[in-house]
Image (cartoon, rainbow, N blue to C red):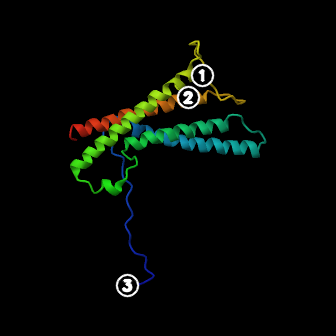
């Protein structure tokens, strides 16, 4: 007879290592370590602001926009990171019951649609990115936030979003080519 107060030994899932499927994914996953450190930098900057504001009564102009920018690029990168890990959302209710051949065809269809979608998003955002860096006359000028500090973060964030979308397109295309080659 078992003791009713005994806690059952339940195995918890182990954290798995990211195993890149190709050279591109390996580079993205490696960059993920850098972006994870940016969240720590953001936290450190916020702590600095709290100390400056409430201990020294000397608030800063730059902390709020800087932390928003850092967190925004980290969140955008998170999408690329998830794609490179093949960790995007699937409806597994049906997917898990498919045989290997049908699952491969479904994967090819999913990755093709995703590659086309991210390519179209990249194409659609390009005029905005270009306009963020160049005036209509062709002169280089980056749009800025318009705040008292006025950093060029809006232009930089748009450019980063464009690059992440292009990288997602490449990653999805690599998945398709890999599946078409039978790997």
Task: Point out the tag, 1 or 3, that comes first from the N-terminus.
Answer: 3
Q: Position of residue 2 (x, y in %)?
A: 37, 84
23 and 144: which is toward the camera: 144
Q: Secondary structure at mark 2?
A: helix
Q: Nearer the viewer, residue 34 or 73?
A: 73
Q: Pointers 1 and 2 in contact (CB under 8 A)?
A: yes
Q: Which of the 4 quarters of the picture holds residue 9?
A: bottom left
Q: What residue did someone put label 1 on?
A: 142
Q: Which residue is mark 2?
A: 156
- The residues bearing labels 3 and 2 have C-alpha atoms spaced at a distance of 62 Å
Select label 3 or label 2 by which is in front: 2
| Residue 39 drawn at (x, y percent) | 55, 43
User: What residue is pinned by disc 3?
Assistant: 2
Q: Is residue 51 visible?
A: yes
Q: Is residue 97 above or below residue 124?
A: below
1 relative to 5 in the view: left or right:
left
In percent of width and height, residue 143 lies at 62, 24
Can you say whether 56 is above or below 116 in the image?
below
Estimate the spatial distance between the alpha carbons at disc 1 and disc 2, rounded to whole Å.
Answer: 8 Å
Q: Nearer the viewer, mark 1 or mark 3?
A: 1
């Amino acid at each position: 007879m078992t003791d009713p107060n005994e806690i059952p030994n339940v195995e918890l899932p182990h954290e798995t290592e990211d195993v890149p499927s190709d050279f591109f994914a390996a580079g993205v996953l490696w960059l993920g370590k850098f972006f994870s450190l940016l969240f720590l930098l953001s936290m450190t900057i916020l702590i600095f602001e709290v100390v400056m504001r409430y201990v020294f009564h000397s608030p800063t102009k730059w902390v709020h926009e800087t932390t928003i920018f850092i967190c925004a690029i980290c969140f955008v990168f998170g999408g690329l990171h998830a794609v490179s890990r093949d960790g995007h959302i699937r409806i597994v209710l049906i997917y898990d019951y498919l045989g290997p051949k049908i699952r491969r065809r479904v994967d090819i269809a999913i990755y093709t649609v995703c590659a086309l979608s991210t390519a179209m998003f990249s194409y659609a955002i390009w005029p905005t990115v270009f306009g963020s860096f160049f005036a209509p006359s062709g002169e280089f000028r980056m749009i800025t936030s318009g705040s008292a500090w006025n950093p060029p973060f809006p232009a930089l964030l748009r450019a980063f979003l464009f690059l992440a979308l292009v990288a997602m397109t490449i990653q999805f295309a690599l998945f398709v080519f890999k599946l078409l080659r039978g790997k």
